Image (cartoon, rainbow, N blue to C red):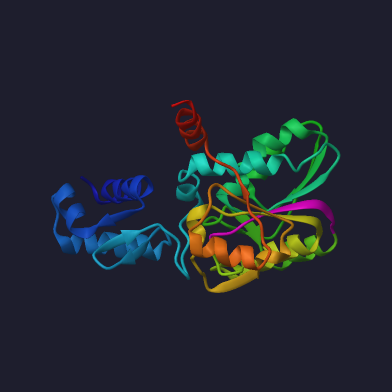
């Protein structure tokens, strides 16, 4: 197998499993451990994975979040459930802000059912999807394009947001710990914060698996959001902390969990 094909195969495994073991990769591709070590080094340099002891992962860390292309393929059931719950907050005639991220990108198709709308976003996936749609006013935020996040950031983005106002902003994050939410990139933080400051209603979308994690930069306190949507309850300790602070979560169960609950109730 050629080097580029092997590295693509490694990324495919990471998308399916979230993490890979160096020895398993060496055996799978019939190459030395040192060859796999170099492959992982190069992929890490490109920002596609994070090396850990004995292997690699695409799970977020305090300084790492995987490429948008790979995040978009992960946790689809949870993302769909959260998006459906978020769309219940949208009414025709609203001005809606949507931030970067693969979860937020999933709002794209659903927003069309609520036309007429004005959508303000730096999310390139939303921009690409809506540029030719009728009945939907699209305000595409400029700035410096980031392939890793498939979105626009920087001074231009932030300045544009300072002149805009919206009925609701949908914000997603890769980490939530205690009573705060975090992100590993300061430019991303500034754009998200600018959207929050420009919206009357702030809605946070955070996967249950992201609770109990931190990243380098604090974005906000959970109390700063009017609605916090997740796909299932986090651990008991987290739920206790949130309850004591008076923070409630909106649960958006996936289709599989709903089916399981239905089956249980019929037994």
Residue sitting farthest toward the front? 267
Image quadrant containing the C terminus: top left
User: x%, y% of residue 126?
Assistant: 66, 43
Which range of residues does the magenta coloring cover?
Answer: 164-174
On screen, residue 45 above or below 13: below
Give the image quarter of residue 144.
Answer: bottom right
Q: Residue at x 77, y 34 (%)?
A: 114
Query: Foreground residue, 186 or 31?
Result: 186
- Answer left or right for 154 relative to 54: right
- Answer left or right for 170 relative to 66: right
User: x%, y% of residue 85?
Assistant: 65, 41
Image quadrant containing the N terminus: top left
On screen, residue 239 above or below 168: below
**Is residue 128 among what the camera can see?**
no
Q: Residue at x 27, y 68 (%)?
A: 53
User: x%, y% of residue 41?
Assistant: 31, 65
Q: Residue at x 50, y 30 (%)?
A: 262
Query: Foreground residue, 171 or 178?
Result: 178
Give the image quarter of residue 242.
Answer: bottom right
User: x%, y% of residue 86?
Assistant: 68, 44
Q: Main secondary structure of the magenta part?
A: strand
Q: How many marks?
A: 0
Q: Residue at x 48, y 48 (%)?
A: 69
Residue sitting farthest toward the top? 266
Query: Foreground residue, 94 or 191?
Result: 94
Residue 104 lies in the magenta-colored region: no
**Is residue 88 among what the camera can see?**
yes
- Answer left or right for 242 relative to 76: right
């Amino acid at each position: 197998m050629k080097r580029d094909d092997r590295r693509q195969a490694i990324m495919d495994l990471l998308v399916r499993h979230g993490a890979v073991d160096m020895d398993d990769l060496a055996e799978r591709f019939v190459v030395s451990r040192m060859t796999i070590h170099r492959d992982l080094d190069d992929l890490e340099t490109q920002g596609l994975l994070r090396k850990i002891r004995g292997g690699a992962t695409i799970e977020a860390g305090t300084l790492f979040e995987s490429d948008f292309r790979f995040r978009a393929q992960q946790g689809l059931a949870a993302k769909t459930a959260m998006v459906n719950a978020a769309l219940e907050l949208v009414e025709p005639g609203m001005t809606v802000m949507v931030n970067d991220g693969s979860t937020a990108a999933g709002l794209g198709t659903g927003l069309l059912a609520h036309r007429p709308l004005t959508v303000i976003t730096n999310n390139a996936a939303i921009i690409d999807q809506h540029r030719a749609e009728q009945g939907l006013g699209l305000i595409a935020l400029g700035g410096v394009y980031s392939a890793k996040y498939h979105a626009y950031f920087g001074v231009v983005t932030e300045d544009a947001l300072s002149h805009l106002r919206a009925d609701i902003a949908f914000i997603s994050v890769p980490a939530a710990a205690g009573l705060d939410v975090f992100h590993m990139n300061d430019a991303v933080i500034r754009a998200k914060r600018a959207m929050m400051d420009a919206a009357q209603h702030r809605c946070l979308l955070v996967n249950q698996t992201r609770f109990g994690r931190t990243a380098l930069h604090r974005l906000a306190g959970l109390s700063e959001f009017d609605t916090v949507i997740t796909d299932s309850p986090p651990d008991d300790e987290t739920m206790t902390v949130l309850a004591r602070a008076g923070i409630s979560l909106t649960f958006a169960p996936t289709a599989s969990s709903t089916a399981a609950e239905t089956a249980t109730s019929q037994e």
